[in-house]
Amino acid sequence: MAPFLATLLSREPRFDPTVSSNEFRTQWVHPSDVFSVLLILGGDIVARALAQLAGSGLTPVTFSFGWVAYSVSALVSAVGENKLMPQNVDCKCKVINGKSGYSRDNSSWVIGRIVRDFDTWSGTATKEKTKKLLGEKWEELKSLDKAAEEPTRAGLVVTIYEPSATPKAGLAKRDLIFWSGLLIMLLQLGIAAIPCGLFGDWGILIITACGNVLAIVTGVLPQWKKEKWACRPKSKYSYILTRGNGAQHAIVILGNGHGLNLEDLASGQSNVESSTNTLTRAVLLALSIFWVLLLIAAAGLRGNTWFLLAIGGIGIVQNVFVAGRSMKPENYGIHLDYVGVFGKTKVMDTLLDVEQKYPGIGRSMRDEFFPGKLPLAGVRAWEQIEQSTESEPRAKAPRESQDDSEETQAEERQVEERI
């Protein structure tokens, strides 16, 4: 007779309401299986945190939930897509050559984050100019309708920067995010040492130490730097970064021979030259194996598992903080000096002002913000600007020399391919 049927027909059925409560109590006292499940969740957070900090040596992305899932996905990405950096950028934007006017969609994590976080890291002058334009636009709207609400966008604000001579481009500046990672690692080891000191349970300490070692090894792979700054240095060309037509801001980075080639960078992660090599794939395979072994070992722990959950919880909080926090361009290896800002409630007026000061820059942006046919008044305004700039010396305009002949030839080849 089947056990279930025998139980039903028994004169003394096994009715025990304490079974569930005992199971709940046991699970909450020693939640051993939960940590194993959590280790395979949250791989995307780990990937973004690594993309933020990796590329400049030590990368303090702490041991946390999600590392096992990430190690497998990183191996698949390295073998299948030949990449480690995330292929989907957070902010869609465009990079425009300040000389030729050619525009390309951005695929670089670095450029995408710089444009996404511009409202955070832009200087006081840019913020004041934006606030002024919004106020002027609101006054214009209230003159037509007294009940008009305050606008969220007005005209165009163009902020001018130039690359710093020092430090070297492509070398990221370490900030609070970096040092917080090291402190969190020490905190995790301190928590793991508590059950070891009180009960002689050294298993949690070993799991935590091994997890942080594997995390550090993953972050110091040379492939990160190769992909993150896949571009030529010492560019003499000027570039415009913008979200496109309808954007409130445009960022102009003048060419002075100290910056990176942002056109290369915008498409650099998809270049063949930045693909993963055999050594990187072999290391990632070994790391994936070690992470799975660590998962198996963690699943075997039965006592003091709340310490392990606390360690993983602290680590995931640090990962989320790193992955989502806004950073300045110098934290991505792009060091900029502020030059000036332009802005008016009419986009065309802003572009004309920029063109007057920096010939070629305003015209390069014009087709992006005005893709159609210009009105007659606009055509005449640009003709007047061209005539005035021909008779005046250029201010900080991009200059060519023999040193950038290779860069010029590369641009010409790109033009021929497009034609």
Image (cartoon, rainbow, N blue to C red):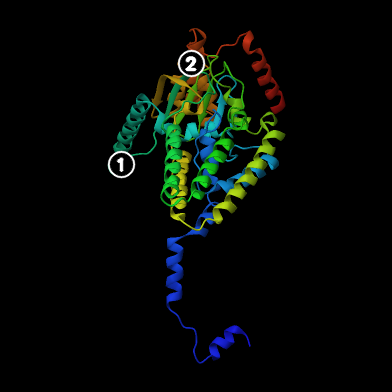
**Residue 413, percent across and down?**
70, 21
Q: Residue furthest left?
A: 146
**Residue 279, percent across and down?**
70, 34
Question: Quadrant location of the N terminus?
Answer: bottom right
Rendered residue at 49%/10% (across/down): 394
Q: Identify the residue under disc 1.
A: 145
Q: Secondary structure at mark 2?
A: loop
Q: Nearer the viewer, residue 279 or 214?
A: 214
Q: Earlier in the sequence, mark 2 or mark 1?
A: 1
**Residue 396, percent across and down?**
49, 12
Question: Quadrant location of the C terminus?
Answer: top right
Rendered residue at 48%/22% (across/down): 335
C-beta proximity under 8 Å, tags 2 and 1: no
Q: Amino acid at mark 1?
A: Asp
> Disc 2 to disc 1, how far (Cα)?
51 Å
The answer to which quarter of the image holds residue 259 is: top right
| Residue 419 appearing in the image | no
Rendered residue at 51%/35% (across/down): 52
Q: Nearer the viewer, residue 150 or 193?
A: 193
Q: Identify the residue under disc 2.
A: 166
Report the mark closest to the observer, 2 or 1: 2
Residue 60 appears left or right of 88? left
Q: Amino acid at mark 2?
A: Thr
